[in-house]
Amino acid sequence: MGYDNLTDQHWEAARLAIHGAFQVRAEVTPSMLGELKEILKFLDHHLDLQGAGESHGPSISFAIDAIIARSDSYRADSLAVECIRNFTSFVKGMRLVIRPARSFWLRWRVTGLIALTSDQWFSSPVPVMGPEDMAEFCEHIAVFIIDDALHVSSIQRWGVTILFGILRSPEWRKHIVTRFWCMFAYCATVEERLESFRWCLQNAIELLGFTRGLPDGEGLKWWYGTLWFHYDKLDITAREEVERIARDMSLGDDLSDLNLYLNLIGQEITRTGKDVDRFSDVVRVSSFGMELRARLIALEGNYHRLARITGQHR
């Protein structure tokens, strides 16, 4: 796949090779799959064919699996640049195959790749698609994640990753559909080193203003809850604002949203505490263990801060 003048026979041979790698071997290692740029070229070509009406779902699925196998979170930015900027058919093809009429497994893989590349996909200096296509794309992502696959733990993580990416962009965030906001219930699963995650918390006040301007109230409800979940990462100004809002809410008769936030944080404290116990030997000596313990302490602090304001006790 390293040449520009490949014939149909070359592409058929490439399809047979990648199908064989995934169908015959129980475990596919990165060394079996060739260079990342070659796999991306293969994916781009078959997305283009799929958009033209040909059926290449398995080839697309295997190519995405190959990309994910060759990638880790530290390479996501370079991967995104390759996908979004260097392959003209890529974005159009991804938009087409995420449509509800496509197969579940094809949309599942596409969602995973979009999550992997979300920091660059949604914050590209040149928008990757126009406003109408953005709106359609956001709707189709929400349909798949919320309606078809929310029970899958990887989808929960990918969905909230994508939501952080969309929220970061002034152009994209206007197209978040109402029901997609509830993905913030899974905000504990996001990779905290993502640029979009860090940007959104650093600009928490700006995004509170944006969500307040939405007509349905769902954006404000779920973004505000996310700020309590990650209260320890906010700057002083944002902390003061979220505390002020909580005090105002606690004076009213309806504490349901505040209780929802406490319940979600409490569930995550319980889950993280079990992980700390399960990996007790590792917790004391590894960076992973120390991060896990630190996260548990931060969550407990966030919980008790909100509980004191609302008069709740755990």
Image (spheres, grey):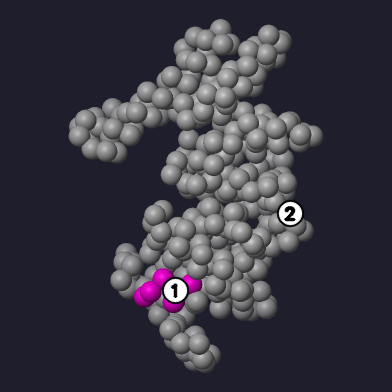
Can the viewer see residue 109 in this picture? no
Q: Secondary structure at mark 1?
A: helix
**Where residue 168 appears, x then y in whole percent?**
61, 45
Return the residue found at the far front: 237
For badge 2, the amino acid type reads Ala
**Residue sitting at 73 percent across and 46 percent down?**
174
**Camera-side residue: 215 or 105?**
215
The residue that appears at 54% across and 46% down in the rendered structure is 196
Q: Which mark is residue 74?
A: none
Which residue is rendered at x = 47% and y = 21% of the image? 302
Q: 162 left or right of 212?
A: left
Q: Which residues are magenta?
A: 34-40
Seen from the viewer's position, the closer of residues 129 and 261 is 129
Neighbor class of circle 2 (other Cα within 10 Å; few <14, some 14-19, many 20+) is some
Is residue 37 within the magenta segment?
yes
Which secondary structure, mark 2?
A: helix
Would residue 149 appear left or right of 77 to someone viewing this image?
A: right
Pointer 2 and pointer 1: residues touching (CB < 8 Å)? Answer: no
Q: Which residue is mark 2?
A: 135
Q: Position of residue 237 (x, y in %)?
A: 57, 24
Q: Quadrant of the N terminus?
A: bottom left
> Does 196 sit above or below residue 65?
above
Q: Find residue 37 and name its label.
A: 1
